[in-house]
Image (cartoon, rainbow, N blue to C red):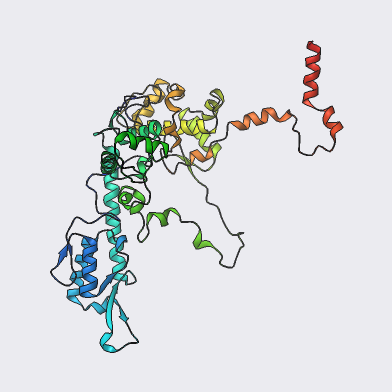
């Protein structure tokens, strides 16, 4: 498959809610490139661990949760200025070592942490600024069509949007690094992975092999066509690592309803559900029920999803892929019927109506692709309203006898047996 931007889907194949970054900002687990200044003396270091060791040994200062500080250089500069204005004891908790021993052997250590409101506010501001930078870069990548790269597993070249390459690697090589919309700094990510392969290193177990053929066989046989989730080198490439102050991606991902557990009252009678609003495929209209949104699309846009489901015998996952395909085409201002591209969505809607393409779908092979299992919009509630096409089949077959596990009444079973009817038919044929 000579990939490129224009294949069955048009000029790109994206898994999206849509894209991402260039010059990576500092991220969790990645050494800072800027100089890190000491809070008390003229010393400065480029390596975070070296500076933290200096602060501990020379100045007896410990900074809590350093890895969760979004911009360590700016954080240090701020506190350096504050320590010049006021004594350190105004800001830091004092920890006395060997408190029961002789006074001459006791030492005071200082802890700077976000228990201090000023420190907490600073960390939140740095986190917010970093998140804004990442989201801005994400938007730039979504709009960028200059992406060009060769697949690291074959010779196919891709251009236009990074998602076409990511989809190809997932589909053709069973190698997935996640949805494009979950990844940030995609170019740097792919370059880091390519360097490992160039060094004959397995991406998962990270062992080094003698030649490319051996590495390829190892990754295939051991099912190591994936990245090592425990390698913090990859943290900077996932948007989840920038979302919440004071939380790592593992904590965010594993969050549940722990804050709601046992408060001594198990009565849920006052619990109220909040209806999920499904958004129309063609406009911004929202409805809280399946029938309302289907009726709106039929009356306002002439699009009858129920009719398509019946005519094309669409099962549940067929409908999922179709909805994600239509979402993507309309987001890219492209007519899904003829693949003509327009400058904005409104022009597409006018074209669909005038050309009569609203109910004109392309061949099923165009949208019946694995990449459309992934939602175009991650919070697309319309996908939750889709009905299972198998329901119709179940209704048709309601008169088929069902044999239960209770076979105590064998005589009645024999009288009503489908096999008996079949045997009679077979006998009459003879």
Q: Residue furthest right?
A: 411
Outermost residue to the bottom: 102
Observer-nearest of 285 and 319: 319
Please tell me in which quadrant of the rendered image residue 53 appears: bottom left
**Of 88 and 104, which appears nearest the observer?**
104
Work out which residue is located at the far top of the displayed protein and give it: 430
Total marks placed? 0
The picture places residue 264, in percent across and down from the top left corner, at: 59, 68
Where residue 228 sits: x, y (%)? 37, 47
The picture places residue 31, in percent across and down from the top left corner, at 24, 56
- Seen in the image, is 118 located left or right of residue 308? left
Above or below, 102 against 157 in this view is below
Q: Which residue occupies 45% across, 41% down?
A: 380
Quarter of the figure that contains the C terminus: top right
Question: What is the quadrant of the N terminus in the image?
Answer: top left
Q: Is residue 167 left or right of residue 57?
A: right
- Farthest front residue? 210
Question: Can I make out residue 194 in this image?
Answer: yes
Q: Is residue 345 above or below residue 75?
A: above
Q: Position of residue 364 (x, y in %)?
A: 46, 23
Q: Can I make out residue 14 in this image?
A: no
Using the image as rendered, state which of residue 53 and residue 425 is in the foreground: 53
| Residue at image coords 71%, 30% | 398
Classify 32 as above or below 420.
below
Q: Residue at x 84, y 38 (%)?
A: 408
Taking depth in this image into account, of 123 and 204 the one nearest to the observer is: 204
């Amino acid at each position: 498959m000579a990939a490129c931007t224009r294949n069955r889907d048009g000029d790109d194949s994206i898994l999206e809610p849509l894209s991402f970054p260039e010059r990576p900002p500092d991220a969790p687990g990645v050494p800072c490139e800027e100089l890190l200044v000491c809070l008390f003396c003229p010393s400065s270091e480029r390596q975070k661990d070296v500076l933290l060791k200096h602060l501990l040994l020379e100045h007896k200062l410990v900074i809590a949760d350093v890895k969760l500080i979004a911009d360590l250089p700016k954080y240090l500069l701020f506190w350096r200025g504050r320590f010049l204005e006021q004594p350190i004891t105004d800001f830091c908790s004092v920890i006395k070592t060997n408190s029961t021993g002789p006074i001459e052997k006791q030492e005071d250590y200082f802890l700077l942490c976000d228990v201090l409101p000023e420190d907490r506010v600073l960390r939140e501001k740095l986190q917010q600024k970093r998140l804004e930078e990442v989201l801005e870069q994400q938007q730039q990548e979504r709009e960028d069509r200059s992406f060009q790269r060769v697949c690291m597993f074959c010779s196919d070249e891709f251009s236009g949007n990074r998602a076409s390459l990511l989809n190809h690697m997932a589909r053709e090589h069973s190698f997935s690094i996640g949805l494009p919309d979950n990844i940030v700094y995609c170019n740097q990510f792919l370059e880091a992975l390519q360097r490992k392969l160039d060094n004959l290193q397995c991406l998962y177990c990270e062992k080094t092999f003698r030649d490319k053929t051996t590495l390829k066989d190892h990754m295939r046989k051991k099912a190591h066509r994936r990245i090592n989730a425990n390698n913090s080198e990859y943290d900077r490439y996932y948007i989840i690592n920038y979302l919440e102050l004071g939380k790592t991606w593992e904590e965010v991902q594993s969050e549940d309803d722990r804050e709601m557990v046992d408060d001594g009252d198990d009565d849920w009678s006052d619990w109220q559900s909040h209806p999920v609003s499904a958004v129309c495929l063609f406009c911004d209209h929202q409805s809280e029920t399946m029938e309302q949104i289907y009726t709106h699309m039929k009356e306002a846009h002439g699009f009858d999803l129920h009719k398509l489901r019946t005519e094309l015998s669409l099962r549940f996952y067929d409908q999922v892929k179709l909805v994600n395909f239509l979402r993507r085409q309309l987001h890219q201002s492209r007519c899904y019927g003829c693949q003509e591209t327009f400058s904005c969505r409104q022009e597409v809607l006018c074209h669909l109506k005038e050309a009569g393409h609203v109910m004109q779908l392309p061949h099923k092979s165009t949208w019946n692709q694995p990449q459309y299992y992934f939602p175009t919009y991650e919070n697309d509630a319309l996908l939750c309203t889709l009905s299972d096409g198998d329901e119709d089949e179940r209704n048709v077959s309601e008169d088929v006898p069902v044999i239960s596990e209770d076979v105590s009444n064998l005589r009645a079973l024999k009288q009503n047996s489908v096999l008996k009817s079949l045997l009679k038919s077979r006998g009459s044929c003879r």
